[in-house]
């Protein structure tokens, strides 16, 4: 029997030996180009739909038309029924709604007060009385159309374009105040005349009947007549 001799293994020569490295490199390149994923591939989520804007509900209500104004501090004044004239603060609406006065008129108006008269119709104002502290820049004043009135010159004939007039008094001097109307006022009625004997001539007030009833004079004639007075002479005969 022949003894065993170990000989080194010799790789058989194959035609694929030359092409194997190229295929292996191609597989490596393909693996490197593929995106790296961990675990199971994640399915692509569809884009979220755009948010739907909330629906807006519009409610239409019917309101009764009113006159409105703002107070000195900018607050909204209470509603005033259409056709009426209203006031904020201590001013007064008088004469059935056709006039307004300063507080406590015809007495002295108080200090540090104010009011807004609103809802005035677009007509010329009729100043019945007006006596307000007259000083630099009118510290006490009635304002109509942005113009301040003080002293004894009120807004006679002025049409309030915004339907309002505003009164303000400071902490100084006070006087009798004002009365302003927006409707024609009847002339003041005279007191009824006392009966005069038939054929006589009579007078009211301080005027004088002289010369045996055939003449009349002003008070204190021929001296200066007094101020703020008046009289009526009646029963005169129909002669020139």
Image (cartoon, grey):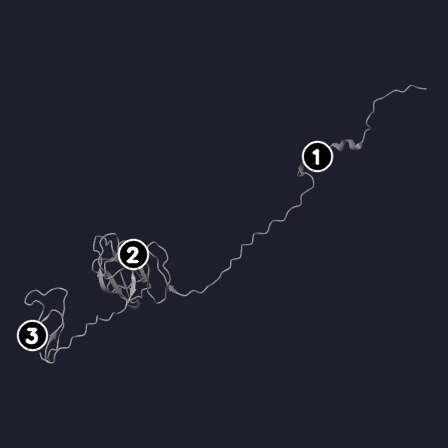
Quadrant location of residue 53? bottom right
Direction from residue 128 to residue 240 in the image, left or right: left
Cβ atoms under marks 3 and 2 closer than 8 Å = no
Q: Which of 197 and 16 is in front in this view?
A: 197
Q: Earlier in the sequence, mark 3 or mark 2?
A: 2
Compared with 204, 44 (above or below) is above
Q: Residue 28 carries which label?
A: 1
- Crowding at dot 2, Cα within 10 Å, few <14 / some 14-19 / many 20+, comes out as many
- The quadrant in which the N terminus is found is top right
Cβ atoms under marks 3 and 1 closer than 8 Å = no
Q: Name the residue under label 3.
A: 215
Q: Distance between the residues labelled 3 and 2?
A: 53 Å
What residue lies at 22% left-to-right and 63% top-to-bottom? 129
The x, y position of residue 73, in whole percent, is 34, 54
- The secondary structure type at the circle numbered 3 is strand
Q: How far apart are marks 1 and 2 (CA)?
A: 96 Å
Q: How far apart are marks 3 and 1 (CA)?
A: 145 Å
Q: Nearer the viewer, residue 41 or 127?
A: 127
Q: Which of 225 and 83 is in front in this view?
A: 225
Q: Residue 114 carries which label?
A: 2
Q: Which of marks 3 and 1 is nearer the N terminus?
A: 1
Q: Earlier in the sequence, mark 1 or mark 2?
A: 1
The x, y position of residue 30, in whole percent, is 69, 37
What residue lies at 26% left-to-right and 58% top-to-bottom? 142
């Amino acid at each position: 029997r022949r003894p065993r001799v170990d000989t080194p293994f010799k790789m058989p020569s194959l035609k694929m030996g030359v092409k194997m490295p190229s295929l292996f490199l191609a597989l490596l390149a393909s693996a490197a180009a593929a995106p790296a994923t961990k675990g199971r591939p994640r399915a692509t989520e569809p884009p979220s739909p755009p948010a739907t804007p909330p629906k807006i509900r519009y409610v239409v209500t019917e309101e009764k038309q009113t006159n409105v104004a703002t107070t000195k501090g900018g607050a909204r004044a209470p509603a005033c029924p259409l056709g009426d004239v209203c006031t904020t603060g201590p001013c007064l609406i008088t004469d059935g709604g056709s006039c307004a006065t300063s507080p406590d008129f015809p007495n002295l108006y108080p200090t540090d007060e104010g009011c807004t008269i609103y809802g005035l119709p677009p007509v010329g104002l009729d100043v019945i009385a007006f006596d307000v502290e007259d000083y630099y820049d009118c510290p006490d004043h009635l304002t109509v159309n942005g113009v301040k009135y003080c002293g004894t010159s009120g807004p006679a004939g002025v049409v309030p374009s915004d339907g309002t007039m505003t009164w303000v008094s400071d902490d100084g001097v006070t006087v009798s105040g004002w009365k302003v109307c927006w409707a024609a006022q009847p002339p003041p009625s005279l007191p009824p005349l006392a009966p005069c004997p038939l054929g006589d001539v009579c007078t009211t007030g301080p005027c004088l009947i002289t010369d045996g009833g055939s003449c009349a004079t002003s008070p204190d004639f021929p001296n200066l007549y007094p101020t703020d007075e008046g009289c009526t002479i009646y029963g005169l005969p129909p002669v020139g």
